[in-house]
Image: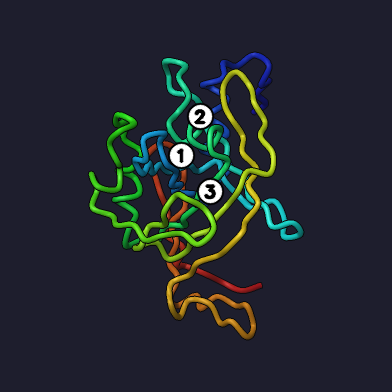
Amino acid sequence: MEIDFGKLTPYERYKLMSSLIVPRPIALITTLSAGGTVNAAPFSMFNMLGEDPPIVMVSINRHDDGALKDTAVNIDRDGVFVVHLCDEAMALKMHRCGERLPSDVSELAEVGLTTTPSADVAPPRIAEAPVAFECTVWETLRSDSRRIFIGRVLRLHARDGLVDRKTCRIRLDDYAPVGRLGGGFYTKTRDRFTL
């Protein structure tokens, strides 16, 4: 089978790409609204781009009505955000943070997640997350359909015991992140092998 992407609608391309390029890590991002409300939303068009400088990328598409999502509005305005990686224990709450709520309502309060202060940026971290990266915007790419934020990582927070600081190795027995497949499907990462 061969498919000419030039003959597909953007939605058809999205469905194919998001279901085939898997599993994708999920960034549960916290930002602050103009009024100080903590906004949290998950994005699976996310990954690391490099370590020198330490940068990550998140692509945030618009709502179906064309409006920018609160996360994109907040990052555009403030230039800071916190990326959390999610494990099995918080997967359902992470997914529920994707519901569209008014910008003055915190998704974290709605789903029962708690915050703790960040060290270098204003948006707080999610206490239950195993990993959090405090970021500032390094570069922004804009198109009609989305904002792509390239963030420079300022600081890593990890659950106690997760990182062996001497070797910079992750204790995988204590880390069970989830990944995104297509549609509403997710995957666990416990079935591992070494090559």
Answer above or below: position of 19 versus 136: above
Q: Is residue 68 left or right of residue 147?
A: left
Q: Quadrant of the C terminus?
A: bottom right
Confirm or deny contact between disc 1 and disc 2 (CB under 8 A). Answer: yes
Task: Mark 3 or mark 2: name the one nearer the start of the chain.
Answer: 2
Q: Residues within 10 Å of mark 3 (few under 14, many from 20)?
A: many
Q: Kindly identify the residue that appears in the image at 25 percent across and 47 percent down.
A: 109
Identify which residue, 105 or 188, lies in the foreground: 105
Answer above or below: position of 6 versus 163: above
Which residue does the numbered mark 1 point to in the structure image?
Answer: 182
Q: In this view, does 128 lie to the left or right of 42?
A: left
Snapshot quadrant of residue 126: bottom left
| Callout count | 3
Q: In which quarter of the image is the N terminus?
A: top right
- Residue 46, given in percent of the width and then of the height, sits at 57, 45
Confirm or deny contact between disc 1 and disc 3 (CB under 8 A). Answer: no
Which residue does the numbered mark 2 point to in the structure image?
Answer: 15
Which residue does the numbered mark 3 point to in the structure image?
Answer: 24
Mark nearest the camera among 1 and 3 is 3
Q: Kindly identify the residue that appears in the image at 34 percent across and 45 percent down.
A: 95
Q: What residue type is labelled 2?
A: Lys
Q: What residue type is labelled 3?
A: Arg
Q: How far apart are marks 3 and 2 (CA)?
A: 14 Å
Q: Kindly identify the residue that appears in the image at 45 percent across and 81 percent down.
A: 161
Identify which residue, 134 or 148, lies in the foreground: 134
Q: How crowded is mark 1: few (under 14 residues within 10 Å), some or many (20 or more)?
A: some
SS assignment at label 3: strand
Task: Mark 1 or mark 3: name the one nearer the start of the chain.
Answer: 3
Confirm or deny contact between disc 3 and disc 2 (CB under 8 A). Answer: no
Snapshot quadrant of residue 89: bottom left
Query: Quick one: which residue is furthest to the bottom in this view?
Result: 166
Q: Kindly identify the residue that appears in the image at 49 percent across and 30 percent down.
A: 73
